[in-house]
Image (cartoon, rainbow, N blue to C red):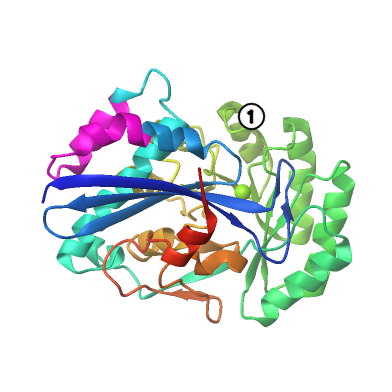
Amino acid sequence: MKITAVDSFLVRVPLRQRTITDSQSSVDAVDVLQVVLHTDAGISGYGMNWSYTRGLRAAQVMVQDDYVPLLIGQDATLRKELVRRMFYANHFVGRVGAARVGIAAVEFALWDLACRRAGLPLWRYLGAARERVKAYSTDGGWLSWSVDELVRDATRLVERGFDAVKIKLGRPDPREDHARIGAVRKALGPSVRIMTDANCAWSLAQARYWGGRLAEHDVYWLEEPMVPEDVRSHAELQRAIPIPVAVGETLYTRYQFRDYIEAGAVGIVQADATKLLGVDEWLEVAALAAAANLPVVPHTNVQQKLHVQLAAATPGVLMVENCYESIEDIWEEPLRVVDGHYPLPQEPGLGLKLRDAVVREHRVG
Ligand code: MG
């Protein structure tokens, strides 16, 4: 199965219904880079990466200018070797970041080809551990909302069948954060899991004090309290507070995850295959987590279908995020949460093909 041609294109999909806000960003659209590998076997493989900032064009340029020449004519089953070649083609300008997210998009397309040739969805191809995957909602809890809006939205999510919701932290005064979480806990009662996410807004001193006090509201985890480069402070925090610290959405290598795990700096491993070098490195991180008895909860926003499939094949995964529901139909055969769970996709592959109409309407560049 030789690769005969590669297409890539960028789409910018506006969020319907609302702008979302956390301590670092205000998001009104999501960019998706689609990479398509065509083969002489008559099968095409689809990969993607995403951003809600504006850097994805750089990744597309690297795919087109630097990776396509390495891929044309190659055997599509040489996935790990092709990833190595792409990585070293650009490692002087991007051992992490744009170079890496472009490689991951190609890596997913190579996996998609393997699964499509086998006629299996990824989760069956990898070997299934379960037949549905628990969801938790991060499509709410936004930082700009009033307490009333937070409570109303979280209540609606629970009425729809979710029993786990995430609320953003990072208001200018942490006392406000504490009161907001308290109001949500009071409204939802004791049986719903409440997770919190500071998106790196806090200092160590703030995280120690206010992170510790989240236990008063029985918070299930504290996500990205501080900048991800600072492993030592996360280790100090995790020793100081009873709530698990969750990190992973801005960790780009298995070595970073290893350092977090070995330092005792993480309680919930939020590996995201779109930030790592794809499915292979995600599975390596999941194995590291399993060996340390740490649960994995993949970070995801528009790429739920990929992570739901990885979760179905990985016993240590607790649940998978559900975000950006307003644009979940950008994919062919979108997954929709029912009773707080994702059904598993049945079509062969990774499920990362954008609908043609979405590409026509939202293509940029
Ligand atoms: Mg987060």
Ligand 1 closer than 8 Å to label 1 CB: no
Q: Is residue 9 left or right of residue 362?
A: left
Check if residue 336 falls in the magenta segment: no
At mark 1, the secondary structure is helix
| Circle 1 residues within 10 Å: few <14, some 14–19, many ≥20 | many
Q: Quadrant of residue 140?
A: bottom right
Rendered location of residue 290, percent (x, y) = 37, 50
Rendered location of residue 307, percent (x, y) = 42, 58
Rendered location of residue 61, percent (x, y) = 41, 33
The residue depicted at 54 percent of the width and 36 percent of the height is: 55
Q: Is residue 16 left or right of residue 5?
A: right
Residue 68 versus residue 138 in the image, above or below: above
The residue depicted at 44 percent of the width and 35 percent of the height is: 59
Q: Quadrant of residue 44?
A: bottom left
* Depth check, front residue: 120 or 205: 120
Amino acid at pointer 1: Ser
- Whether residue 189 is visible here, answered yes or no, is no
Residue 173 versus residue 177 in the image, above or below: above
The image shows a total of numbered marks equal to 1
Name the main secondary structure of what is drawn in magenta: helix
* Depth check, front residue: 79 or 165: 79
Residue lying farthest top? 92
Q: Is residue 296 left or right of residue 157?
A: left
Residue 318 versus residue 47 in the image, above or below: below
Residue 184 versus residue 54 in the image, above or below: below
* Depth check, front residue: 89 or 153: 89
The residue depicted at 67 percent of the width and 71 percent of the height is: 192
Rendered location of residue 210, percent (x, y) = 79, 44
The residue depicted at 29 percent of the width and 24 percent of the height is: 88
- Whether residue 54 is visible here, answered yes or no, is yes
Residue position for label 1: 233
Task: Provide the residue span drawn in magenta.
Answer: 63-88
